[in-house]
């Protein structure tokens, strides 16, 4: 069965991006949040994103209106009834995600798959909350979702081949390139990326070089599109800290351990671009109405 009606749970930056991408590819999307404020912020983000796309000539006004018309918003979990599949993109808390997967499992017995966009939590741990672990897997998108082409398809111990096939097909249909990975912390990309980013944080923490020189060094010396500290801010320091914790817990290797500076920044609310301050300062995001 193909996926024509997709549920996205979580209307934050990632969830909104997933919803926009799926709707732009012609999918009908139901975006869920238990509170109205995040949904209203998501609506504004979507409108701004579509306006930018029109200004760059990548989208006509008619196409933009089509994207808007294919997304519906709900504060009721029951509003997801009848969807063909789910992608979850809520806070990186295994208990929150686990309870959600349990609820979705009960509500949607006929959905092709329940996928998590987690970047650090084992898929098997989430699947254990359900009565049908064979239809649970990871679909790890990258930020910003409408731009980044990669999706990691994370296959857990009990994930069925049909589930993997359905998820990979959806990824391709919405314009992404899927790569398959085992259910290990960090998957493919973060397992390689995190040691590099943490090395940059430690270098800055120790006063070895300025933030600007660290970033310029990697941009001009290695042809990276952005420097590591800028990338940390873009990803979100709170997200990175959770990924580091997960990687270190699983592998006990020092290159995955979050440096003390990162912890201090996270607990101080300096999470990067989304909060207006990380390793650099940014214009404060607009508050929800």
Image (cartoon, rainbow, N blue to C red):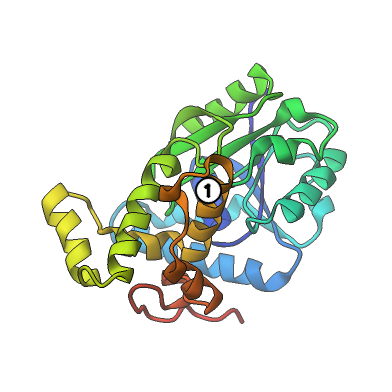
The answer, for residue 66, to whether it is visible in the render is: no
Q: Is residue 24 visible?
A: yes
As drawn, which residue projects farthest toward the top?
A: 161
Q: Secondary structure at mark 1?
A: helix
Which sits in the foreground, 201 or 279? Answer: 201
User: What residue do we see at 39% from left, 66% from top?
Assistant: 233
Front-most of 231 and 264? 264
Q: Position of residue 114 (x, y in %)?
A: 70, 37
Residue placed under numbered mark 1 in the picture: 248
Most distant residue in the left direction = 221
| 200 horizontally vs 278: left or right | left
Q: Answer above or below: position of 67 versus 185.
A: below
Q: In front here: 71 or 7? A: 7
Left or right position of 169 against 150: right
Q: Residue at x 66, y 19 (%)?
A: 162
Residue 229, compared with residue 251, is above or below; it is below
Task: Name the one closer to the observer, 187 or 36.
Answer: 187
**Quarter of the image where one finds residue 109:** top right
Measured from the top left, where is residue 76 in percent x and y?
Answer: 81, 59
Q: Residue 8's x, y, as percent?
A: 65, 49
């Amino acid at each position: 069965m193909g996926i024509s009606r997709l549920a996205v749970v979580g209307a934050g930056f990632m969830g909104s991006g997933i919803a926009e991408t799926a709707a732009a590819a012609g999918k009908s999307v139901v975006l869920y949040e238990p509170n109205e404020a995040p949904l209203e912020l998501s609506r504004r983000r979507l409108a701004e994103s579509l306006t930018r796309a029109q200004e760059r000539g990548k989208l006509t006004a008619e196409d933009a209106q089509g994207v808007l018309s294919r997304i519906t918003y709900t504060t009721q979990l029951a509003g997801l009834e009848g969807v063909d599949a789910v992608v979850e993109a809520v806070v990186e808390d295994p208990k929150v995600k686990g309870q959600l997967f349990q609820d979705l499992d009960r509500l949607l017995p006929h959905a092709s798959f329940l996928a998590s966009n987690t970047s650090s939590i084992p898929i098997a741990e989430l699947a254990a909350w359900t009565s049908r672990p064979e239809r649970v897997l990871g679909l790890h998108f990258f930020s910003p979702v409408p731009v980044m082409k990669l999706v990691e398809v994370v296959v857990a111990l009990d994930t069925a081949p049909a589930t993997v096939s359905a998820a990979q097909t959806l990824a391709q249909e919405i314009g992404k390139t899927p790569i398959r990975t085992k259910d290990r912390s960090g998957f493919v990309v973060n397992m390689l990326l995190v040691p590099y980013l943490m090395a940059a944080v430690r270098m800055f923490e120790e006063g070895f070089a300025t933030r600007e020189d660290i970033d310029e060094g990697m941009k001009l010396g290695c042809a990276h599109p952005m420097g590591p500290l800028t990338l940390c801010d873009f990803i979100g320091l709170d997200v990175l800290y959770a990924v580091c914790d997960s990687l270190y817990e699983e592998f006990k290797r020092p290159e995955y351990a979050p440096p003390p500076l990162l912890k201090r920044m996270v607990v101080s609310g300096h999470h990067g671009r989304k909060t207006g301050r990380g390793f650099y300062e940014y214009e404060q995001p607009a508050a929800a109405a």
